Image: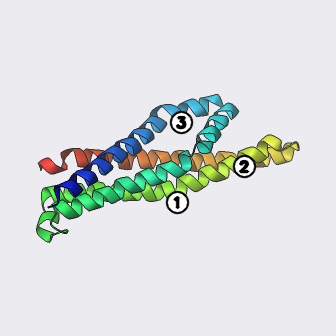
Amino acid sequence: MNATLLIALRVIHIFFGVFWAGTIFFMMGFLQPAVKRMGPEGGRVMQALAKRGYLTAMPVIALLTVLGGIGLMWMVSGGFSPEWMGSATGITLSTGGLVAVIALLIGVFVMRPAALEAGAVGGRLARATDPAEQQALAGELAGLQKRMATGLHIVTMLLTVAVLAMAVGRYL
């Protein structure tokens, strides 16, 4: 086993995994409730995050975490050997990896598009002068916010499972 590659994969997987999960836990526990409580001003906070590259960085960080994990699993399992994959460690780590992949897919295909669309709708809402148009845009924005919140709840649960599996998997 190549020790340098193993160390590099562990650093990538752990560093980016901590960043990904920590950011999601922070958003779920603190940022989302605060932004919601702020009302329309909360939308400006989310727009500022988007302008700083949040919606691009998070999928890349999640992908690096998953790819690092796959590489690690390949190395420690002897190329995904059935014996290792069927062990308690293999089952636990592969379950954690699977739920992380699902979390990544939800982030990329549900949360990110909804956030981008919400930013566009929010911009149109800020410029709208017709009350009927404002009401329609506000309803559309509320639906997008609900989709993002639901996605965040699901991703938080999935990453909780993934983090717990990674924490205990090697000791089983």
Pointer 3 residue = 32
Find the residue positioned furthest to the right.
130
Q: Position of residue 137 (x, y in %)?
A: 76, 48
Q: Position of residue 162 (x, y in %)?
A: 31, 49
Q: Residues within 10 Å of mark 2 (few under 14, many from 20)?
A: some
Which secondary structure lies at badge 1? helix
Say which label, 1 or 2, has the lower sequence index: 1
Of 3 and 16, which appears nearest the observer? 3
Q: Residue at x 78, y 40 (%)?
A: 126
Q: Amino acid at mark 1?
A: Phe
Q: Amino acid at mark 2?
A: Val
> CB of mark 1 within 8 Å of CB of mark 3?
no
Pointer 2 residue = 121
Q: Position of residue 102 (x, y in %)?
A: 40, 58
Which secondary structure lies at badge 3? helix
Say which label, 1 or 3, has the lower sequence index: 3
Which secondary structure lies at badge 2? helix
Q: Residues within 10 Å of mark 3 (few under 14, many from 20)?
A: some
Instruction: Name the mark on residue 109.
Output: 1
In this rendering, the answer to whether 38 lies above or below 5 is above
Q: Residue at x 50, y 57 (%)?
A: 108
In this rendering, the answer to whether 97 lies above or below 166 is below
Q: Residue at x 53, y 36 (%)?
A: 32
Q: Position of residue 37 (x, y in %)?
A: 60, 29
- In which quadrant will I find the N terminus? bottom left
The answer, for residue 34, to whether it is visible in the render is yes
Q: Residue at x 67, y 47 (%)?
A: 119
